[in-house]
Amino acid sequence: PWCRTPDGETTRAEMHADALRCVGGLQALGVSPGDHVVIVLPNGLDFIRAWLGVVLAGAVSVAVNPKAAQSELAAVVEETGARIVIAPVDTPVPSTVSRVEVAGLLRSLPAEPVPRTPDDPASYIQSSGSTGRPKFIIETHGMYTMAAEGYPYWLGLTADDVLLTTLPLSHLNAQAYSTLGSW
């Protein structure tokens, strides 16, 4: 398997197929390229499915740590103008958005990825907020590609290596290096 978590394991091919079903589900909900989609999920396969699905749909992923306060989620939704939040049913979301669960997206027909340029935003990552309210850092498709290609090269990783991440997948390091770097 490519990825193993406490909630299961998957290959790259299976994850890609799941992400394309998420693309189809997001498009059926009216998500268009450039739209912001908030993801509030713990580390696990569903986070990766949702995140890749959002990015492959041409939308901008806005990952929020699931341990964040409800007021922080409301502020993120307001600041980004998101209309969709991907979250478990027990996560309180603002009344201004529609909630969808990954299981619902996975029931969709797969759709083709939306072409994007290296300069197009792929994700908004929140800063730590050490000097005030967290700010968004725009990560582009090109930045993710460079990290994904560079990380294994810089470290001399091979197909026999195993990576472990304990960081939240809402964090850039866990996305760009631990996840995409191993992809």
Image (cartoon, helix red, strand yellow):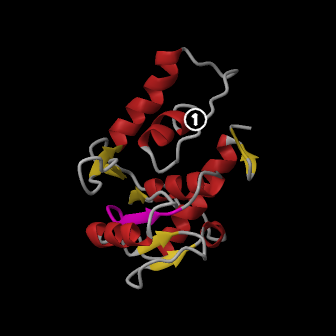
Q: What residue appears at the point 49 percent right and 18 percent down from the top-left corner?
A: 153
Extreme residue toward the top, this view: 156
Residue 161 position in % (x across, y down): 66, 22
Residue 86 position in % (x across, y down): 51, 68
Check if residue 126 falls in the magenta segment. Answer: no
Q: Nearer the viewer, residue 146 or 129?
A: 129
Q: Nearer the viewer, residue 24 or 73?
A: 73
Vertical comparison of 1 with 40: above or below: above
Image quarter in which the N terminus is found: top right
Q: What residue appears at the point 53 percent right and 42 percent down from the top-left corner?
A: 167
Residue 68 position in % (x across, y down): 46, 62
The residue stretch that appears in magenta: 32-40
Extreme residue toward the front, this view: 131
Quarter location, residue 59:
bottom left
Extreme residue toward the left, this view: 131
Q: Which residue is mark 1?
A: 183
Image quarter in which the C terminus is found: top right
Vertical comparison of 5 with 42: above or below: above
Q: Which amino acid, by three-letter code, is at mark 1?
A: Trp
Label 1 sits on a secondary structure element that is loop
Q: What residue appears at the point 42 percent right and 42 percent down from the top-left corner?
A: 172
Tell me if mark 1 has few (under 14), some (14-19) or many (20+) residues whose alpha carbon lies within 10 angstroms of its own: some
Quarter location, residue 119:
top left
Q: What residue appears at the point 63 percent right and 33 percent down from the top-left corner?
A: 164
Answer with left or right where residue 32 lies relative to residue 4.
Answer: left
Residue 129 position in % (x across, y down): 30, 50
